[in-house]
Amino acid sequence: MKTPDSRLTRRAMLAGGAAVGLAGVVGCSNEGRGGETGNNDDATRSQVRPAYVRYEGVKPDLAGAEFNIPDAFLRYPAEPVDAIAEPPGDGEPISVTTYTNTPIPPKLAQNAFWQELNKEAGSPVTVSLTPSVDYNQKFATSVAGNTLGDIFMVGGIPQVPQMLAAKAADLTPHLSGDNIKKYPFLANLPETGWNGCIFGGKVYAIPIPRGAISSSVLYSRADMIEAQGLKAEVKSADDFVELCKGLSDKRKNRFALATAPTNFVRNMFDQPSGWAENGDGSLTSFREHESHEAVFEILTRLWKEGYIHPDAYSGQNQDMKARFNNGTSPLVHDTFSGWQTYLQTKVQDAARIAIIPPPKADGSGQGQTWLGGPTIGVTAINKKAEARVETLLSYLNFLAAPFGTQEYLFRKYGLEGVHHEMVDGKPVLNEKGFSESQLGLSYQADGPWTVFLPEDASSTQVCFDAMKEICPNAIDNPVSGMYSETDRRKGPQINEALDDVAEDIITGRKPISAWAAGVKKWKSDGGDKIAEEFAKVLAESR
């Protein structure tokens, strides 16, 4: 399995208007294949779009709205608000199907966090967790076997509108317009996130917000760069290659890069994020960008010189994080949201994290990062649990309680003295807390993301400053959260095939010239059709 920067498919399948539906499994007809959008134009969505009511309960230490980034907090409020008066559950079990990017937690009998969660939720919660890289297959199997939980994170498979109509409860009467105000923390979710939750004039899911925090950037071990006497400032592609050279030492089994920095190098050439809109309203994929020959010249050099870890194209997300934390690879391309996990799992006390913005390859200025999509996915309620929809929405509202509340503090950090200790007004997870709390709660529901990194005294400011520098000029995907049936049906396969070509080029198994042929095949196998469908939906959204 390839790591995130080696291919785009995992994020594409799980972000934005997270994909759903499975032809031939949920009794779907052929209607809706090809260019069907499920009547998901802006006019239709606006009729049922939930109201937005911003939570104003806590003032940030560092306000991010001006820069289109999350607010940041240097400490947790000394007296967190008890935001929910009564447990949301009804005493009956709540089953959840979702994914995880961390190790599976201890079972309920050995898990104090899980036991307390059940008390606070007012219902025993059971979670079926699958590693994120395997989740789409698990989701398809669960749909086929009719074994989805009461609440399920929607996986990346075809025919979203049909699958939702067949398997998910219609939430429109509960969430459309002002109806959502019964669930104030769901009403606090950013408006753009709802685009991927509404099909055929009905609300079928709730968004799990991310936005700028899910933008991928180049992490660096600032302590190792400093110890090597190297310059952390990278002003050109040549500077980047020189930094990688200085950080690599085969004799010490050290390779500068934990994974192939494919998208970081693309950012040096201002390639579009996903798609670029042309003057006539058509769309062109980043895969067609003229700079790819130059991109691959840089990447093949990095591989040939031994600056990329030899296992870059295998393993799980945890492997690249481990390489970064143990110093085997002092550079890794990952999302801003991953910062806290790096702090929580670091193995070297002296480790300091910093971000290296992409330069323009020719040294003429700063490159442009790709802005993270508004959501990481969407969560639906099983139609079989429709009689309990208000209870299940109340549970999701509980999970979406924002920063500053007692509910957020418990959800993220567990019990004081058991799972975390308060250090200078900040909750710091201990090993037990990190292990027991990995129940995939943030892949069920979540509040708007904040920058809060209590594990390290300076990281919150460093992360906020990096986002403030990078994100205002980041490139947005014009069709983020929009739906193309061909993209859901064929996109994963044709994208993976082209990613394989990229891997073969970078690792020297194919010449750079193979990219043009690969793109041509990608276009004919479905890429052109996807572009047409997205262009149509984009036009309808205005």
Image (cartoon, rainbow, N blue to C red):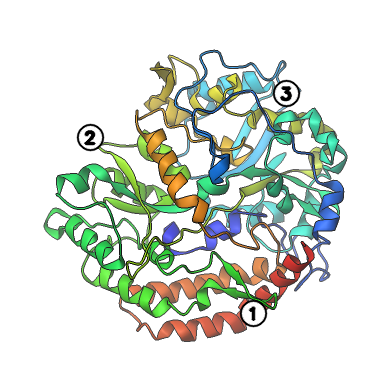
Question: Does 297 appear above or below 149?
Answer: below
| Secondary structure state at the residue bearing disc 1 | helix
| Secondary structure state at the residue bearing disc 2 | loop
**Image-based side of 146 in relation to 436, left or right:** right
- What residue do we see at 74% from left, 25% from top? 92
Camera-side residue: 143 or 460?
460
- What residue do we see at 51% from left, 70% from top? 496
* Image quarter hosting the N terminus: bottom left
Q: Which residue is mark 3?
A: 88
Residue 163 location (% of width, % of height)? 77, 57
Which label belongs to residue 528? Answer: 1
- What residue do we see at 78% from left, 52% from top? 198
Which mark is in front, 3 or 2?
A: 2
* Image quarter hosting the C terminus: bottom right
Which label belongs to residue 350? Answer: 2
State the residue lying farthest toward the left. 251
- What is the spatial separation of the Cα atoms under label 1 and label 2, in whole angstroms? 50 Å
Which mark is in front, 3 or 1?
A: 1
- Identify the image quadrant of residue 241: bottom left
Q: Crowdedness of circle 2 by 10 Å Cα count: few (<14), some, many (20+)?
A: few
Q: Earlier in the sequence, mark 3 or mark 2?
A: 3
Camera-side residue: 390 or 315?
390
Tell me which amino acid carries mark 3.
Pro
**Image-based side of 392 in relation to 424, left or right:** right
- Identify the image quadrant of residue 274: bottom right
Tell me which amino acid carries mark 1.
Asp
Residue 343 location (% of width, % of height)? 36, 36
Q: Crowdedness of circle 3 by 10 Å Cα count: few (<14), some, many (20+)?
A: many
Tell me which amino acid carries mark 2.
Ala
